Image (spheres, coloured by chain):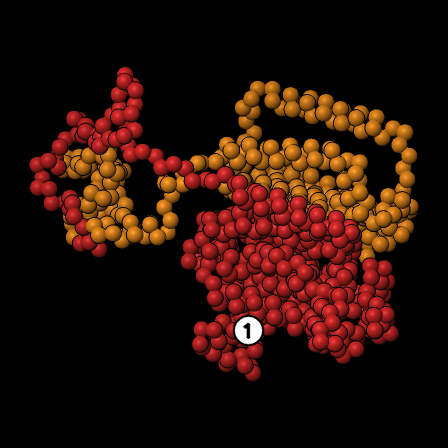
Amino acid sequence: MTTQTVLAEATSVGGGEAVTFWILAPLALLGAIGMVWARNAVHSALWLVLTMLCLGVFYVLQAGPFIGMVQIIVYTGAIMMLFLFVLMLVGRDASDSLIETLRGQRTAAVVLALGFAGLVGTGLYRALDGVQAVGLDRANAEGNVQGIARLLFTKYVFAFELTSALLITAAVGAMVLAHVERRKEDRMDQIATMKARFRPGNYPGPKPGPGVFATSSSVATPARLPDGRLTERSIPEIMPVRELTAEETSLKGTERK
Amino acid sequence: MNLYLAAQDPTLADFGKDPWWLVLIKIVFAFAFGLLATLLGVWFERRVVGRMAVRPGPNQVGPFGLLQTLADGLKMAFKEDILPKAADKVVYFFAPTISVICAVTALSVVPFGPKVSIFGHWTPLQVTDVSVAVLVLLACSSMGIYGIVLGGWASGSTYPLLGGLRSTAQMISYEVAMGLSIVAVFMTAGTMSTSGIVAAQGDGTQLTIAGQDIPAPGWYAILLLPSFIIFFIATVGETNRAPFDLPEAESELVAGFMTEYSSLKFALFMLSEYVSMVTMSAVTTTLFLGGWRAPWPITLWAGANSGWWPMLWFFGKVIALVFVFVWLRGTLPRLRYDQFMRFGWKVLLPINLVWILVLAGLRSIEDWQTKDRLVATGIGAGVLLLATLFWPSRKKEPAPPLQEQVNSRPHGSFPLPPMDLQVPPSPRTRRVVAEREPANVVAGPDSREV
C-alpha cells in the first residue's frame, strides 16, 4: 500500500508518489479554478469537493493517512454536505450575479485577502524559522495516529479544548437563536390529537382549500362543496363571508382576446 | 494452537507485497463479490420478504427464481434512458456512478480471510489494509451519499430534491452516531486497521464451566453491546434501508432522489443500494462479529481459522446480517422524519457518549489494584445515585385559570381586549351574504360534506 511504501522511503520522492502527484495536482488546481469560476453555486461546491479530495490523497501520500482521511470524512463528507444542503434549500437556479451591490467591495476584498495572506505567511515563517525538521520516520515513530493523539492530548491540549469550547459556544448560540420554545402543556400527544380529530362534530378529513369549486380565486371566497353548497370551514375564521356579485365576476374587457 | 493461529493472522506489514497480478485478482474478486451479492441479494430479499408475507416470491426464472434479478437487470438495460429537460446534465449523469464507486471501494479494506497461498504466494485475503482502514470505510460511506444528494438535486424537480435534502440531513446525523460507536472499537482494539481489529477479537478469555474450557468469544458485539446496536442502527440509516428509507419514501416522495432516473442509471442506484447493504454487513461483521474468525463450537476443530475455510464463516455472518436488514424491512413501518431525526440526535448520540465515557473509565481503572478500583467505581455510582435523587423536577405548578389571572392584575393595568373578539366585517364589503338565506353554514357536524 502507498502509505507503507511512502513511510519506508520517505526521504526521496518515489515513483508512485510522483505519478499520483502529477495526476492529482492539476485536478486539484482545476477544482480550485472551477470553484471560483463556476456560475452555479452547487457546481462551485462540487469543484471544491474535487480539490478537497485531491488534498486528502496528498496528505495520505505525505505519510499523514489520518489527516488525509479526516480531510475526506469531515470536510468533504460533512461540511461540504452541509453547504450543499443550504445551497439546495436556496434553490437550484441561484447563480451569483455580477452586479456589485456594495461599492468598492471587490477592491476591498482583494486588499484584505492580500493583507491576510501576508499576515499568515509572516506568522508561519516566524513560527517555523529555526525549526529543525526531525523527519517523517521520527514523527511517525509510534504510528501516525498515535503520534497525533499524543500531541493533541499533551502539548496542544489547551488549544484543542479552547477550540472545542469555541465551536460548542457557536453551536449552542445557533440553537438558541433558532429555538422555538413550546411549553409542555401546550403539546398534544398522539392519543389526544386523535381523540380531538375524531370527536363528534369534527370532520376528520382535510379541509377543502379556499377557492375549490369557487367562482373566484380570493381566499375570502368560501369553497363550494360538490353539491353546490358553500362551506365556511374553507376560509379563515377571521374573514367575513361574502360572495361576489354578478357585476364583479363578469369579464372586465381587459382580458387578452 | 495460538502460535499456529498467529501465523495465519495478517498484520499491516503483510500488505503491499503482492505482485501486480495478485492485486488485480483480489480487486476483481472484491468487485465481482459486490455485483454477485447484488444479484443474489435482490433475489434473497424478495424471497424472504415473500415468505414473511406468506407468498412464494419470484420463483419462475431459473431454479428457485435465482435468475429473476438477472432478467430484471437485462430488461432495465433496454429501457429508454430519459433525461429530464430541467436536469443538470453532467451532475445527473455522474451521480449514480459516484454511489456505485463508493459502495464498491469500501470492500477493498474488508478482510475476507486469513493468509492463504494463491499460486504459491502467501497473501492475506484482503485487497489492502492501511493503518486507518476503518476511516477509509467511513469516508467511502460518507462520499457515497453525494451520489444520492446530487442525483436528487440534478434531477431538477421537487420530489427528488426533497429526497436529496433528507438524505443530506440523515447522513450527517447518523454518521456521527456511527463514528462514535466505532470509537469504542478503537479504544478496545487499539488499532484502526481492519485486519488488526479482527485479530484483536480473536483471543477471548477462557471460561471454565464444569471442567470444560470454553473460550468466551472476543467479539465486540458482546463486549461492546451498546456500540454494536447503535452501529447497526446507524448502518441502516446510512444505507437508506427501511425503516429509515426516508430519501426514497414512496408514500411521500414517489421514489425520492431516483424519481427521474430510468434505465441503466436507475439500475446503478439499485446496485449501489444493495452493494452498500452488503458492504455495511461485511463492515459490521469485521468490526463487531469477529470478521472471518469462526465462532466457538467450530473452533473446537483446530483448522477452523486457517486456509480458505474462514471465508465461509465470513460469508455466513454477512448473509445473517443481510437477513436482518431484510427482516427489518419486512417488519417495521417507515419512521416519520422528525421521529427519525429525534431518534438519532436525542437517543443514539447521548447513549453513545455516556457509554464511551463509561468505557474509558473502565479502561483507565483496569490496571489499578482491586481496592482502588472498588473505590473509584463506588464514587462513580454514588455520584450517579445522588444526581438521580436530587435531579430538579421539571414539573411546574399548574397555571391558574385565565379568568383568575385577569382578575389578579393590579388596578389600573392596561385594558385587555375581550377574549371572544370577532373582527367585524368591513363596512366597505357589500353584504350580499346577509340577504342570502344562511344555508351554507352548518353549525353542527359537517359529516354531510363527505
Taking depth in this image into account, of A83 and A167 the one nearest to the observer is A167
Q: Colour of chain B?
A: red
Q: Amino acid at mark 1?
A: Trp
In which quadrant is the C terminus of chain B drawn? Answer: bottom left
Q: In which quadrant of the rendered view does residue B27 lie?
A: bottom right
Dot 1 crowding, Cα within 10 Å, few <14, some 14–19, many 20+: many
Instruction: Name the residue rendered at 84%, 65% in the picture.
Output: B18
Q: Colour of chain A?
A: orange
Instruction: Name the residue rendered at 82%, 45% in the picture.
Output: A147
Instruction: Name the residue rendered at 52%, 41% in the picture.
Output: B391
Residue A21 appears in the rendering: no
Residue B400 in the image, given as x and y percentages of width and height: 31, 33
Q: In which quadrant of the rendered view does residue B202 lie?
A: bottom right
Q: In which quadrant of the rendered view does residue B55 lie?
A: bottom left
Question: In this picture, is B133 found above or below B205?
Answer: above
Residue B387 in the image, given as x and y percentages of width and height: 57, 42
Residue B191 appears in the rendering: yes
Taking depth in this image into account, of B68 and B8 the one nearest to the observer is B8
Instruction: Name the residue rendered at 73%, 69% in the picture.
Output: B207
Q: Is A111 placed left or right of B344 in the picture?
A: right
Q: Is A227 placed left or right of B87 in the picture?
A: left
Q: Which residue is mark 1?
A: B43
Q: Residue furthest bottom?
A: B63
**Helix, strand or loop at mark 1:** helix
